[in-house]
Amino acid sequence: MDKWKGFNSADKKGTLYLLSLVIGIGYIIDIFSLDNVVLKNLNIIALLITAVSLIFSLKESVLDRVFQIVVYTLLLCVVATSFLKANHIVDDEMYFSAAVIGALIPITGFVLGKKHTIFLGSFLLLFVFSAFANSRDYCVAHDRCLLIIILLIGYTYGMYYLISLIEKGAVNRKVLFGRLEQQNRDNLFVNSLAMELMASQAADDIAPLLLNKIKSYTDAGFAIFSVYDPLQKCMLVKHIDAEDSIIKTIEKVVEEDMLKVRIPVDDATRQMMLNEKIGISQSFADITFGAVSSTDNTAIKCQTGLNTFIGIVHEVSNQLYATTLIGLRQKYDLPSIATLKSYSYVASLTLKRNITELALQESESKLKCLIADKDRYMQIISHDLRSPFQSLMGFSEILVNSLNDCSSEEIRDGLLIINQTSQNTYNLFEDLLLWSKAQSGKLILEHGSVLLKELCDSIIEVLRFNAEQKGLTIVNKVPELFRIWADSNVLKTVLRNLISNAIKFSNHDSDVLVTAEVADGSVIVGISDWGVGISVERQQNIWDDNQLTTTFGTGNEQGTGTGLLLCKELIEKHGGKIWVESRINNGSTFKISIPNLT
């Protein structure tokens, strides 16, 4: 037990100087008042030892040694008196005076501690008893001996009891101050963490900040942030803050990159983690639920000096979201559970805020896109639907007004035009509905094996009338029995749009060619025409929904390019891509690539 409990540096020095002054004065008085040369020399030696010891007392680290030297020098003087008495060098009065002075020595127990108090008191008790037992004047010695022994026993016990009370009070005060200091340190840590997290943005990754703060606070050897994957039912390591030597040691032992470690978490373990929030273990294997083996655990602890491992759970909306894992060395005290729970709560609250804000921002972005989509939808209706409806109304009005003047062949041609226009308008409506589903995320692909040549023939048959109006021939060069894994209805929409565009922008009396091949594990379908072509500048904009502009075909057909955007979105949902190869006045070839899964 610390002999200085309850004493600060000033108390130590003050007590030492006061004690040395009293003892020194006694030595000096004896030196000048005694006739006995031996006793004078003894006091001179004791005075010099005390003086030299005081010089060394300037160093606080040796104060306890100086106290012991001063006190035991005094004790030595008292004991030496007994030898002088035995050799008849000093008389009984001098011997008794030395014994009485020696009886005051246990007071130094205030500074030297209880052990010294008991030792000095017991020694002096025996010394006084011996002194009076050997006295020639037995009656006088008996009375004095009994009185001094009683006083010495009471005095020694009183000193011991008083010192015990002082030390107990000092210990309690130290514990109290220690707790207050630790609580203040804990509060500063939590408040500082909360303030820094509050200043972070929703898009910020707060994991590095969390690891840095908890590692600094606990002086941990490492801190690891892992995110829970509900599909794989495991913790995935995302961030590490650690001393390089420790990480290298762990990776060498487990023979795996720490960022690739997977910690399995079954449903029972996940629920236990949510209930307890904080897990403390002496085993790295236990805290990682077996991801680190027992053998590796022993090697890691021996080579890194890490002794205690703490897991801290972060939950979002009552669900396991992430954990912080730290490793501590044996020489450091464990942080309080209350502080660790506060760390968990503040981190979880921030994670929930960030996730919520990001979701809100994403929702706002989607909402803006749906504002934009509505505008484009209205633009499509105003541009792409106006022309066919005008044609329908115009031809039907002509037929109604000129029915009696038209031949059967003219009526048939008019009805064919109305039928074809109606079919094209219906197809446009289907495209709009399909695009609406794709934009809202409600489009579900139904994959199957599609006979590609047969599908292309059905599309060509529908578009034959449009092609014949411009003297075009649609050539289907897709190999027989050529199959592709796709949603047939969606693929049909894509091909119909691409062939329709080829017809729209082809020169009269030319061809439209449909081809298919397998390359690099994908099926590539090409739609080629020999028409007006597309400039390089325009090729860069046709896939941008913010660059929609009205265009006119070689027969003055009107369009906005929305069909190409629909094709791009539908092909990408198949895991494929679409692109164009074109030069002005040399035609265009639109190609789509879909992974070959057949």
Image (cartoon, grey):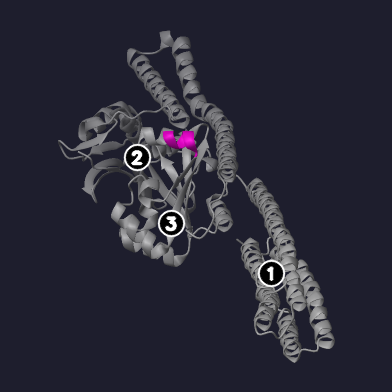
Q: Which dot, 2 or 3, sits closer to the camera? A: 3
Q: Residue 34 location in percent, x, y?
A: 81, 86
Pick out the residue farthest to the left: 481
Question: Where residue 415 sits: x, y (%)?
Answer: 37, 16
Secondary structure under tag 2 reads loop
Q: Going from the N terminus, do you reach mark 1 or mark 3 first?
A: 1
Q: Relative to 65, is 40 above or below?
A: below
How dense is the environment of label 1, judged by Cα within 10 Å: few (below 14), some, or many (20 and up)?
A: many
Give the residue at mark 3.
307
Asked if residue 125 can be seen in this view, the reply is yes
Say which label, 2 or 3, has the lower sequence index.
2
Up-down relation of residue 400 to residue 544 (above or below)? above
Q: Which residues are magenta?
A: 272-277
- Neighbour tally class for label 3: few under 14, some 14-19, many 20 plus, Cα within 10 Å: some
Q: Which quarter of the picture shows residue 75? A: bottom right
**Given this view, does label 1 or label 3 mark the residue nearer the observer?**
1
Q: Quick check: 298 left or right of 192?
A: left
Cα separation, mark 2 vs mark 3, equals 30 Å
Where, quadrant-wise, is the N terminus in this rendering?
bottom right
Under circle 1, the secondary element is helix
Residue under label 2, please give it: 232
Label 2 crowding class (10 Å Cα cut-off): few <14, some 14-19, many 20+? few
Q: How many marks?
A: 3
Residue matched to label 1: 132
Circles 1 and 3: CB atoms closer than 8 Å: no
Q: Inspect the magenta stretch and tell me whether residue 275 lies in it.
A: yes
Instruction: Give the residue type that dot 1 points to.
Output: Phe
